[in-house]
Image: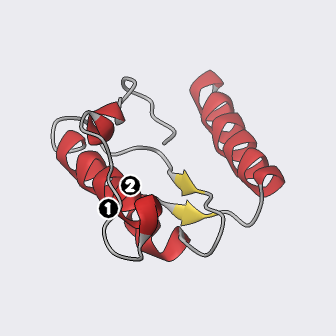
Amino acid sequence: MVRSDQPVNLVGAFEAAVVTRGTDGRVTESVRRLVQQAEAVTRFVDSPIASFVLFAGGRAAEAASLGVECSSLADLASKVRHTVGHGLRAASS
């Protein structure tokens, strides 16, 4: 998440250990918890300027509510660079 107000910590999603359920493994449950934590935390702060997700193995669809899907680490870096650069230019105007 790219924010202009304050940092947001989503670590609360993993205060309890993520256990394997059936054949889903830990990833599905981890993504579910991360989405729930983001929804809970963002009720108390302004919306982020932008938010991006990068997941291996086709898990981005499960985290779609967290932000715009990036196709690679380079794509993520480019989108963050563009977003931050745009914000800095706007702030200096």
- Mark 1 secondary-structure assignment: helix
Disc 1 crowd rating (10 Å Cα; few below 14, some 14-19, many 20+) is: few
The residue depicted at 64 percent of the width and 71 percent of the height is: 57
The picture places residue 27, in percent across and down from the top left corner, at 46, 61
Say which quadrant the C terminus sits in.
Answer: top right
Residue 45 higher or lower than 31, as above or below:
above
Task: Choose between 60 and 18: the one closer to the eye.
Answer: 18
Q: In this view, does 84 lie to the left or right of 52?
A: right
The residue depicted at 42 percent of the width and 59 percent of the height is: 26
Residue 72 higher or lower than 73, as above or below:
below
Q: How far apart are marks 2 and 1 (CA)?
A: 5 Å
Residue bearing mark 1: 32
Q: The disc labelled 2 sits on which kind of residue? A: Ser
Residue 49 higher or lower than 44, as above or below:
below
- Mark 2 secondary-structure assignment: helix
Q: How many labels does the image show?
A: 2
Give residue 57's mark.
Answer: none
Give residue 30's mark.
Answer: 2
Are the two marked residues, 2 and 1, in contact with CB atoms closer than 8 angstroms?
yes
Report the residue that reaches farthest toward the right: 74
Quarter assignment of residue 4: top left
The picture places residue 65, in percent across and down from the top left corner, at 38, 66
Q: How is the image coloured?
A: secondary structure
Quarter assignment of residue 68: bottom right
Q: In this view, does 16 lie to the left or right of 50?
A: left
The picture places residue 7, in percent across and down from the top left corner, at 40, 24
The picture places residue 2, in percent across and down from the top left corner, at 51, 39
Task: Choose between 23 and 16: the one closer to the eye.
Answer: 23
Disc 2 crowd rating (10 Å Cα; few below 14, some 14-19, many 20+) is: some
Q: The disc labelled 1 sits on which kind of residue? A: Arg
Quarter assignment of residue 43: top left
